[in-house]
Image: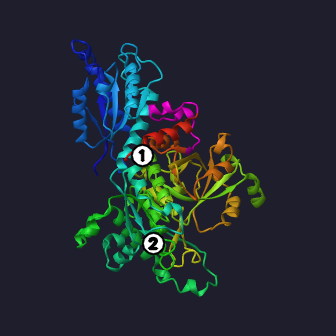
Amino acid sequence: MGYPKIGIRATIDGRWGGVREGLEKQTMDMAYSAAKLIGENLKYPDGTAVQCVISETTIGGGTEAAKCSDQFSKENVCATLTVTPCWCYGSETFDMDANTIKAVWGFNGTERPGAVYLAAVMSAHAQRGLPAFSIYGHDVQDNDDKSVPADVREKILNFAKCAISVGLMKNKSYVNIGGVSMGIAGSFCDPDFFQKYFGIRAEWVPMVEIIRRITLNIYDQAEYEKALAWTKENCKEGFDVNAGKNLPEIITKSKVVPADKDWEFVVKMTLIIRDIMLGNPKLDEIGWHEEALGRNAILGGFQGQRQWTDFLPNADFSEAIISSTFDWNGAKQPIPLATENDTLNGISMLLGTLVADKAPCFHDVRTYWSPEACERVTGKAPTGVAQNGFIHLINSGATALDATGAAKDENGNGIMKAWWDMTEEDIKACTDATDWCRANYEYFRGGGFSSHFRTAAEMPVTLLRVNLVDGIGPIIQIAEGQTAVLEDDMHNAIDIRTDRSWPTTWFAPNLTGEGAFKDVYSVMANWGANHGVTVYGHVGAELITLAAMLRIPVSMHNVSEEKIFRPHAWAAFGTKDLESADYRACQAYGPLYK
């Protein structure tokens, strides 16, 4: 892949004759320290270390700034981090490229006024309409201190991770396989939204393309046989919700793929959907050059309901496996594939997995359970993280298997891992914790299978969702919290009230006592859609930073104020009400790709 990179700009006091010469080493050492920090701690989605490009010289004025810009333009630099220990000439040295995300780290020392330059260049960035992130250590450092303080380290990594995420999305595609599912608003793909806010091209592929490829055998036969064998060995069937039902003729006559052929069909579907999105050189070897190219996708969605699922097996298996950190080939990069082609949940999946490096888990945000309702139905009041109530996150069987919580850390605790950390034991644990129930024919006349599990570990997760609102544009909602583990009898009593063939996660958001997070009911009541995404870990702060880079306001979150990191210019829109300032800043600057 063409990796987006972070450009490190080393700016310096331009006065020759002793001043500049004495600062060269210290300035470049800051650049090397920043590059080392980023390269050792951040990875691209394929698992390789994030790359930095350091300016060939220090930058003391406009000529050297232009040379650096030319250098970076040839290196796919998507963001710049300017570093300096001293005073520099603000508007002569700053990054004036409108296409890069920007940050400046000014060394907090008393010998040289790096902080003064930082303030001056932030003023220049604001005045020129080029917002930049300000990085300034809390404590004064000695002049010869080459360490990167913890607070500076956190901000540099947050900035770099989110900026690389912006770069990764640019010039990639969202592939709509099908169109609008059951009138779900998020299924209406808005190409202007994807283009202007993410630099993503929207593409459409009719679902009939899958039928064509199955009919004409446009898939890797050897991989299909390997995938089918793995599936039969590792994907055990659960109960059949249809057993014993006297189904009407309109349902029974609609299933055209025999039930005993469902696995073969859905495995082929999975290979084909992946090939449509990513391409596959194996197809070129069998004479299908155009199909081998793929669609340059970074994410996609499958409509399914109802024009497909009314007579063909659903895509729950495909959506679950493609979004997981493993398949029949072992550990692999998860690719967001949205159920019901909910494009807004799809982009939420992508944003979550980019900042968390974990599989994105697609959910219906189904039901709020108050402690009182839980006790009335189960005879027990919830305890622990669920004591204030919880939200039932469930889907029709298309959630990444990582959400089982069956992977273990070194202490035996259930977690979700980056794909490059997944072991054979973790993969087996996730497949063992999942069974595959036959699709409910009353919903899916064409059959298929739903992944069925319960999240069996208490884990930190972040729930998120992007919404489009007329008159505002895109907004993002963020709720950090924990997955809850209910006692078996409580779980069973509640779970069967929905659909016991689907995967369940019990979610307890962290409460602040105010606004949308004053209680669990308010979180549910303020959620903007029927869908949401969880990713492992508390990554709300990173998502807020990423949203600011993309100029998408955050409409609700429960991240503590001291963790919020946005461009310095956001303070010009007000410091008392940060939510209002965020809305007005995003409106003023507009989408990233106008």
Q: What label does residue 591 carry, if any? A: 1
Span colored in magenta: 555-576
Give the x, y percent position of residue 507. Answer: 61, 52
Give the x, y percent position of residue 255. Answer: 51, 82
Q: Nearer the viewer, residue 173 or 4?
A: 173
**SS of the residue under disc 2:** helix
540 left or right, relative to 293? right
Does residue 235 lie above or below 28 as drawn?
Answer: below
Q: What label does residue 10 carry, if any? A: none
Give the x, y percent position of residue 16. Answer: 22, 15
Query: Which residue was labeled with disc 2?
Result: 232
- Of mark 2 and mark 1, the one earlier in the sequence is 2
Does residue 560 lie above or below 387 as drawn?
Answer: above
Q: Nearer the viewer, residue 270 or 190?
A: 190
Q: CA distance from mark 2 to mark 1?
A: 47 Å
Which residue is rendered at x = 48% and y = 76% of the image? 307
**SS of the residue under disc 1:** loop
Circle 2: residue type: Lys
Q: Nearer the viewer, residue 505 or 312?
A: 312
